Image: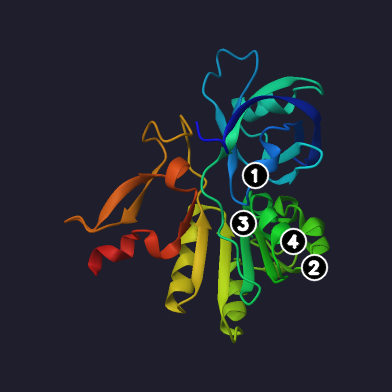
Amino acid sequence: MSPSKFQENAVILENSNYRGDYFLITFSAPKISPHVLPGQFVHLQLPHSPELLLRRPFSIYNTNAEAGTLSLIYKAIGAGTGALSILPRDTVVNLLGPLGQRFPQATKDQRIIIAAGGYGCASTYLVAKTAESTGLCLLGARNKSDILVEDEFQKTGFEVQVSTDDGSYGHKGRITELLIPALDAGNGDTVVYACGPNAMLAAVGRLCMERDTIAYLSYDMEMCCGVGACFTCVIKRKCDSPDGWEYVRTCKYGPVFDAREIYWESDKSN
């Protein structure tokens, strides 16, 4: 295991309801916390749950290196996250991390646009928190209750625009309807950071590539090992093979990819 990755028995400091089915959990994890970079994740082992043997990957929402803490936002939607949601304070949970490739950091001269859908709101927060300059943050979800950490993004100095599918908050429609004018309004070097459902990432990637704009996409894939030992979390990446693509493991080579690396279904006809 490389020096920047650790296995740590972390202690739960807080595990509280954030909103609806969403929970905020904070760990004392002094080994992992100082090494976390935007876009990375931890692989979590549920304690005292032999029936839930496999670890669960969670994008890291926030970290405080000085305090040695890291936080996750998750939604209780299945057996694993349901079991996690009832763990009390002071429970010891084994974490492996930080894992995965980071979001590359923008330069001071680059214009930053964050496009986050659903869980991606929490997964991209560290991009804004650690950025050398402010930019535009686009948050999208099905409805208002699925818009996460809006206030926290605003505190970083980023302009925040919101879209919801049902129109319950902000613009009624898809996040790409906010992204198009934001991209077209740019008059310089722009970099886009995106996390959300795969269909959203495909749309964001296409729009950015059409405009020769760099886009880094973070994929939320089902994982088993989390360290590149299996092939549960693969996606297609362009290469020089006869087929023009190869399978790569998102836990090892991602979860962040340059949109230009991805082999899109539309590439079949090219």
Between disc 1 and disc 2, whose residue precedes? 1
Q: Secondary structure at mark 3?
A: strand
Which element is circle 1 on?
loop
Q: Which residue type does callout 1 highlight?
A: Val
* Residue type, numbered disc 3: Gly
The answer for how far apart the CA atoms under marks 1 and 2 are is 22 Å
Look at the picture and state if 97 lies above or below 167: above
Camera-side mark, 1 or 2: 1
Q: Is residue 216 left or right of residue 77?
A: left
Mark 2 is on which residue type? Gly
As measured in the structure, the alpha-carbon distance from the residue carrying label 1 to the one carrying label 4 is 34 Å
Marking on residue 157: 2
As drawn, is 53 to the left or to the right of 109?
left
- Going from N to C along the chain, the mark reached first, 3 or 4, is 3
Label 4 to label 2, Cα distance in Å? 25 Å
Label 1, on which residue?
36
Circles 3 and 4, Cβ within 8 Å, touching? The answer is no
